Image (cartoon, rainbow, N blue to C red):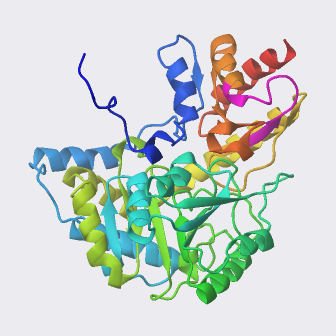
């Protein structure tokens, strides 16, 4: 035996303290199991449209397999700038960078603005990746929970009270994963004014901004403007401490392509370029070519998807609320219902969802995956056909009656 032998290899303390994805834990228990209906991931049941796939094939056939600019190819950056300008007002292309996925966009922006030891506030329940990223960087995350009711809602004053002087950033995902909450423009104006006074960064996760339904806060497109959730980019000045992350995954049915983008103040772009280089260098060129046609020709896809998801949301909302022991608020956006489950098993939704996989062949996401405040709730991704949703509802109903 060696004397003074070193301890066994281990990751940094902060990495060891991270929570593993409980969504993945449930999915891993069910993947490969025969007859499971999977609604656990935020993913549509339809493949990427053919014209987008064809653009990538053509790029590959043309030999587009080399490195690109850190910020992405110029035609895609210009297409994104035009797209964002149509939604939120004029945006200079020099503030746009392409990323290798939406989650990469969130990591890059967090690396850009968050220091070790910083105080960061997050509105929760929230997709676990966005909560854990600041922790990886050594920040302290303070949570402000949404309020459960007929719809999920934000207590703005509670958030402002948490945004104390010295807070570095606030993390806001609207439309929200998992609850479907959508922030109102008036709330954004209040939050932005507060953050301007105290020099607080706003990191906006805008991935679901096109997936909005019947929110009364003025979401539907007017005067030729496409329908879109309220965005801080609507209100921002170029010098504001606002950064936005977005993705091709949800609006254009491109989850597996791992392609996204960021909008940041122009003076920070050179430093952002360094971070892209040291993280991924660049996004694949052939995927970026697919991104161009998605942005330029994809509004018809988005319109069809929104109508399809609205019908799916309404159907599943009614089915769930008809079941004993379930209360499902109506989501205003995104692609999920985050519903409360009463009775046995509700105190441990991870165990409950694992039982659903084994006993009902139904794959749902446990509320505890989105933080302790999500315990007692379950997330169901309704980006699916009504037939599959009805099959899943019947399985849940039979499980609950047993």
Between residue 374 and residue 164, name the one nearer to us.
164
Residue 172, image quadrant: bottom right
Report the residue at 46% width, 89% height from top.
239
The segment highlighted magenta reads 338-350
Please identify the quadrant where the C terminus is shown: top right
Between residue 106 and residue 339, name the one nearer to us.
106
Q: Does the magenta stretch include residue 164?
A: no
Image location of residue 343, percent across then percent down: 88, 26
Report the residue at 72% width, 56% height from top.
332
Image location of residue 210, percent across then percent down: 56, 60
Q: In this view, does 224 lie above or below 330?
A: below
Total residue callouts: 0
Report the residue at 35% width, 48% height from top.
258
Between residue 29 and residue 14, name the one nearer to us.
14
Q: Examine the rendering and report whether any part of residue 49 can be seen.
A: yes
Report the residue at 54% width, 39% height from top.
19
Q: Examine the rendering and report whether any part of residue 381 can be seen.
A: no
Please identify the quadrant where the N terminus is shown: top left
**Residue occupying the far left of the picture:** 63
């Amino acid at each position: 035996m060696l004397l003074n032998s070193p301890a066994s290899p281990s990751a940094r303390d902060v990495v060891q303290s991270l929570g593993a994805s409980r969504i993945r834990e449930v999915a891993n228990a069910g993947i490969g199991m025969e007859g499971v209906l999977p609604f656990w991931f935020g993913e549509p049941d339809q493949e990427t449209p053919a014209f987008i796939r064809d653009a990538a094939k053509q790029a590959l056939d043309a030999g587009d397999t080399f490195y690109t600019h850190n910020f992405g190819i110029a035609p895609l950056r210009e297409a994104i700038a035009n797209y964002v300008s149509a939604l939120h007002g004029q945006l200079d292309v020099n503030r746009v960078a392409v990323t290798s996925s939406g989650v990469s966009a969130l990591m890059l922006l967090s690396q850009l603005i968050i220091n070790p030891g910083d105080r960061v506030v997050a509105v929760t329940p929230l997709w676990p990746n966005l909560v854990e990223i600041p922790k990886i960087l050594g920040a302290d995350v303070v949570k402000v929970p949404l309020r459960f009711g007929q719809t999920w809602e934000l207590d703005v004053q509670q958030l402002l009270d948490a945004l104390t002087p010295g807070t570095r950033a606030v993390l806001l995902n609207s439309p929200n994963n998992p609850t479907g909450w959508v922030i109102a423009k008036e709330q954004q104006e209040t939050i932005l004014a507060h953050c301007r006074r105290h020099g607080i960064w706003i990191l906006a996760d805008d991935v679901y901004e096109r997936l909005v339904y019947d929110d009364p806060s003025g979401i539907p497109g007017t005067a030729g403007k496409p329908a879109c959730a309220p965005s801080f980019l609507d209100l921002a000045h170029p010098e504001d401490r606002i950064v936005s992350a977005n993705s091709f995954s949800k609006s254009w049915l491109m989850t597996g392509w791992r392609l996204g983008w960021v909008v940041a103040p122009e003076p920070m772009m050179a430093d952002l370029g360094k971070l892209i280089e040291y993280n991924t260098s660049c996004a694949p060129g052939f995927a970026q070519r697919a991104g161009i046609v998605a942005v330029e020709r994809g509004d018809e896809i988005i319109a069809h998807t929104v109508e399809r998801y609205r019908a799916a949301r309404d159907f599943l909302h009614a089915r769930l609320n008809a079941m004993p022991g379930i209360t499902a608020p109506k989501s205003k956006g995104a692609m999920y219902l985050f519903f409360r489950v009463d009775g046995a098993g509700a105190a441990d939704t991870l165990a409950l969802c694992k039982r659903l996989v084994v006993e009902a062949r139904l794959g749902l996401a446990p509320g505890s995956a989105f933080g302790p405040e999500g315990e007692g709730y379950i997330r169901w991704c309704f980006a699916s056909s009504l037939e599959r949703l009805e099959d899943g509802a019947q399985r849940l109903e039979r499980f609950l009656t047993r």
